[in-house]
Image (cartoon, rainbow, N blue to C red):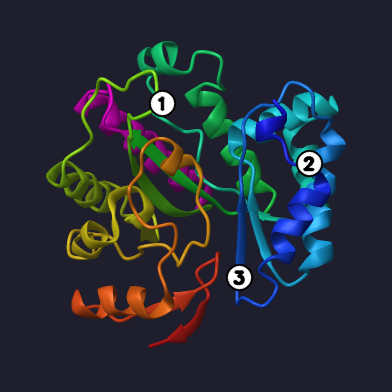
Amino acid sequence: DKKHRKSIEDIKNKVRERLEEPITEIHMVGGIHPDLPYSYYLDALKGIKEVRPDVHIQAFTCVEIQHLADLAGQSVGETLEELKEAGLGSIPGGGAEVFSPRIREITCERKLDGEGWLRVTRIAHKHGLHTNATLLYGHIETIEERLEHLDALRKTQDETQGFLAYIPLAFHPKNTEMSEHSRTTGIDDLKNIAVARLMLDNFPHIKAYWVMIGPKLAQVALSFGADDMDGTVKEEIITHMAGGESEQALGHKTLIRYIQEAGREPVERDTLYKVLEVF
């Protein structure tokens, strides 16, 4: 679908639009496109680096990585090395959904399964790429399935120590095939943060993603186990297409105020959690 496909020049122009802004990361994910060749993804990374060589690129979920390896007719490890050479810096946590086979059969039966997602993650960690992990909650999963998901992440982290952050993602039902479901409540959102912090003690960071749950609840989540709200975020598409009502971006000063009023110390960090500035 051309509507959802950007040319390499489109991608480069998108980066050029913000050349004057102090951006440290470009986050890029997509679906499994039936027609795009493997070379397109390498060229996209190279194109971004050509325009902005200093930026860190976090791109392609584990689902996409497996697809790219299949396209290239080679191993996941070989594919990751080529993506790294082209400019890939780390891998986001999307595509994990809920690992439960029951859930995946209903919601995403054609997507890489939970075991496959974890396998690609382990390979990425082995090849020196840090990743994040997510859980999409608030649809048809049970509490037990949420906990099984967290347990699988914890065990994987014990093996590899390659995860940087865990990010629970509240399901937004609008404009989806599950639009009859209600949005998650603030209590459920906070419980997911708190339980994750207790169970995933081997994860360095727990993120309250303000784009998903709103900046005010993310601010409260800093007292429930989260130590990260994410950054200013200049443009987000997926959540807002599903009815997300949060702002498209938060200014530096606004984000700093939220953190300070929560009794915490604002720290600007890069993708790999290197401290850039303390406010």
Q: Quadrant of residue 219?
A: bottom left
* Residue neighbourhood size for the residue with mark 2, other residues' Cα within 10 Å, grouped as few (<14), some (14–19), many (≥20): some
Label of residue 266 in the image? none
Q: Residue 155 at what x, y percent from top left? A: 41, 39
> Is 59 on the left-hand or right-hand side of 146?
right
| Residue carrying label 1 | 99
> Is 223 on the left-hand or right-hand side of 49?
left
Q: What amino acid is at disc 3?
A: Thr
The magenta stretch spans residue 255: no
Q: Residue 211 at what x, y percent from top left? A: 37, 53
| Residue carrying label 3 | 24
Residue that appears at 42% across and 31% down: 97
In depth, the one of 26 and 56 nearer the eye is: 26
Q: Mostly what secondary structure, the magenta segment? A: helix
Q: Quadrant of residue 105?
A: top left
Tell me the distance, in whole angstroms, between the alpha carbons under discs 1 and 2.
26 Å
Find numbered disc 1 in the image and state the secondary structure of the residue it sits on: loop
Q: What amino acid is at disc 2?
A: Tyr
Find numbered disc 3 in the image and state the secondary structure of the residue it sits on: loop
Q: In this view of the protein, can residue 237 be seen by the observer?
A: yes
> Is 169 on the left-hand or right-hand side of 219?
right
Q: Quadrant of residue 57?
A: bottom right
Front disc: 1 or 2: 2
Q: Residue 187 at what x, y percent from top left? A: 12, 45
| Residue carrying label 2 | 41
Relative height, residue 154 to residue 271 (above, below) = above
